[in-house]
Amino acid sequence: MSRRGAFVLTVLLVAALGGCASEEKPRIPLGAARPATPVTLASPDESGLLPMSEWPAACDLLPEPVVREVLPAATLVELKRVTPASDGGDVVLPGDAECQIRVDFAEAKELQPGRRGGWIHLTVRVAGTPELARKTYDENIVTSVRGERTACPPELVAAAGLDDCTAADSEWTFRKHGVAGQLWGIAPDLNRGVRFEGQKKGSGADVIWHDTVEAEFLRAVAARLP
């Protein structure tokens, strides 16, 4: 092969390899929850709380169709109703006051056999009068959050109609009228080169999972609260 032919072949190989290296995998799309009709709540009793049987169930505030609206590429959405652990107060919470949601993706790694995907946890901590909810929020809910707490983005508070909202690295606390609770999650571990829409190159999935996915779920929850 002549020197000219070898040079041309080298240029073509470099161009081909460069094209493969720069080719990005499709992004995992993110969506938005549709407008919702607020649930109807009963009247509080003399204690200021709603009867336990009348508390809004956490999984009803964040049902599967809503999860799929926000995460349309999910291959599995699994909801589990559980009794939340006590926050140190005197109130024993209802058996469906917490919802554990597992979301799987085709592009997620399997961390352990049978354990893969991301998680969202939603807990209703109090349902009653606005005064009691505010007191419980200030004294028990916000103080239980670990790490540095900051105010939620003003645009999220306004869009969700929240009365109180605090963000931490891995958790949100919220109050709307007489209902207050917590929302937190765990981002999925994605395959190499796979990112969510809007996820910056070099940043982990946990950042956009907290700032975008969890924030949209919180807005969806608030939309269902009267």
Image: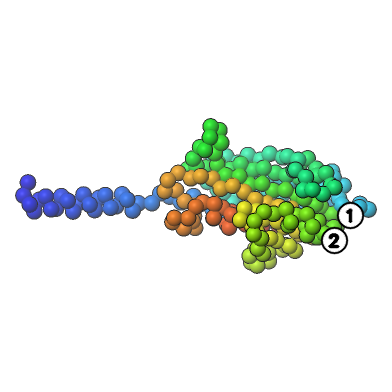
Seen in the image, is 74 located left or right of residue 126?
left
Determine the residue located farthest toward the front in the rendered image. 147
Give how far across and how far down residue 203 sits, in percent: 47, 55
Position of residue 94 relative to residue 160, above or below, is: above
Is residue 226 in sight in this rendering?
A: no
Label 2 amino acid? Glu
Instruction: Rate crowding at label 2 as few (under 14), some (14 to 19) or many (20 or more) other CA atoms within 10 Å.
Output: few
What residue sits 15% from the left and 50% below the top? 9
What residue sits 26% from the left and 49% below the top? 17
Seen in the image, is 162 located left or right of residue 42?
left
Give how far across and how far down residue 27 sits, in percent: 46, 51
What residue sits 64% from the left and 43% below the top? 101
Q: Which residue is mark 1?
A: 48
Q: Quadrant of residue 177?
A: bottom right
- Pointer 1 with pointer 2, Cβ within 8 A: yes
**Residue 131: which disc?**
2
Q: Earlier in the sequence, mark 1 or mark 2?
A: 1
